[in-house]
Image: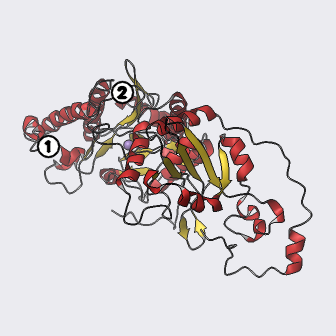
Amino acid sequence: MSDQPRRAAHDTGIPEGLLRFMTSGWATPPGTPAAPIEGIERFAARRAALAAAFPGEVLIVPTGHEKVRANDTTYRFRPGTDFYYLTGNTEPDNILVLTVNANGKPDATLYCEPNPGKTDATFFTDRLKGELWVGPRLGLRQTAERFGVATKPLAEFAADRANAPAAQTRVLPGIDPALDAPGGPSERDAALATQLSEQRLIKDELEIRELRCAIAATQAGFDDVVRGLAAARSEREVEVVFGARARRDGNDVGYGTIAASGPNACTLHWTRNDRRFGEHELLLLDAGVEADSLYTADVTRTLPIDGTFTPEQRAVYELVFAAQEAAFARCAPGNDFLDPHRAAMEVLAAGLERLGIIASAADALRDENQFYRRYSLHNVSHMLGLDVHDCAQARAETYKFGTLRAGMVLTVEPGLYFQPDDLTVPARYRGIGVRIEDDVAITPDGVEILSAAIPRRVEEVEAWVRSAAGSRGAGAASSTSSETASVRQPSR
Ligand SMILES: [Mn+2]
């Protein structure tokens, strides 16, 4: 980022007199130290665990910068996941450097933007960094106090890096383009990303607690949506109701809400959410609140909008439910990560045969066929944590082809999707898409379904939607149809 004060085309110049006037007459900021973040020792333990894998090396983990949305407007900043995991720091532009000694013990430094206070004109001339524009930032002293790590000015990072032995330095790739190796990450850099992802496979107790918070807020968001469902007319209303809960109880949504009604449920990542509901349709809502600690839930419920599944919708729902139950039963330490998936696919294949959609489950399940995948589309599990698809850089042998271990948190989310134009499917099932997704923690003796309090059985789901319809108008989700001319035509 440029060191020049940043101005916009519509700003007028600042005369000398105003500059002098603006930089004087401010109270001295209070010298109270910043409070240390909660769990500060956890973050230190994570840095120590990472360092132990790289004795004698220098590890550089940036958090990244604000991203431009258009011209000079940016998205709200969301820190780099690994940087946050190691520091707890949510401010942009920071860089963590771990200088690891020969015994694997880290010396941590956070490079951050100093806060020169109001004697420096940038506090009101710099639109991107100035406190009058964007609010306070911690600066060197408060950053050190808050995160328990030594700090240095960001401007000194380049020289310090140049002095570190390049052959012993690794940079977490893909976060800060200015630090990335030209021509793509080296094997050494990729190995740092892999190590971090694999370390994050096992959640510590602080992480489990935060995931529980995110899931509780998500449950409240689903309740809000269900409460407003009888009055809602479109996917847009569902998205905003859930999004309101995500901002009220957490940082934001952990990923773009999928509010897919009717045939849109057959599009796995339907996030346009611009369709008006039809009669007797299902709503597939795949949504998660990201807590202020940045841990996210990832839950899907498929709801009959009018409170009753049609016989065809119910048959598909019951089948997906049975597949999920079979998957839960295979969630235990020591099992393959793919065991729950395999169990779910066997149930789905048998059910597809019963529904007359495939001729033979046995034939469909053969490795060289896997015909069921035309309707199931995706595997049933992924890791969950700070990222919705967590630990993405872990090696296949520790993740996809690895073993479930206590402390892992993952989703269990079978689905069936019958495309509206799929001629292999009896007409009465076409356009039905069902996914049921829960978040589970592997425990020493088995599994805990963290999202179990959100209704899931057919009867419970119907009762949930109907009872909420009866108490319409209560609570936040009084989505009286406020959409009029602004609603676009359904895209399909
Ligand atoms: Mn998921």
User: In this rendering, would 457 be left or right of 291?
Assistant: left
For mark 1, give the secondary structure: loop
Task: Look at 38% across and 58% down and name the residue there.
Answer: 185
User: Is residue 20 visible in the rendered structure shown here?
Assistant: yes
Q: Nearer the viewer, residue 74 or 24?
A: 24
User: In this rendering, would 189 be left or right of 94?
Assistant: left
Percent x, y of residue 314: 29, 36
Residue hosting label 2: 405
User: Is residue 230 visible in the rendered structure shown here?
Assistant: no
Mark 2 and mark 1 in contact? Answer it, CB < 8 Å: no
Task: Look at 8% across and 35% down and name the residue there.
Answer: 362
Q: Nearer the viewer, residue 249 or 447?
A: 447
Q: In what quadrant of the picture does the N terminus appear? A: bottom right
User: In this rendering, would 247 be left or right of 179?
Assistant: right
- Which circle marks residue 370 in the picture? 1
Q: Quadrant of residue 22?
A: bottom right
Percent x, y of residue 343: 22, 30
For mark 2, give the secondary structure: loop
Q: CA distance from mark 2 to mark 1?
A: 28 Å
Dot 1 alpha-carbon crowd within 10 angstroms: few under 14, some 14 to 19, many 20 or more? some
Above or below, 6 against 138 in this view is below
Rendering quadrant holding ligand 1: top left
Callout 1: CB less than 8 Å from ligand 1 = no
Task: Look at 43% across and 37% down and name the residue there.
Answer: 199
Percent x, y of residue 360: 7, 38
Above or below, 73 against 345 in this view is below
Above or below, 223 against 492 in this view is above
Q: Amino acid at mark 2?
A: Arg
Q: In what quadrant of the picture does the C terminus appear? A: bottom left
Q: Nearer the viewer, residue 321 or 313?
A: 321
Residue closest to the far right: 25
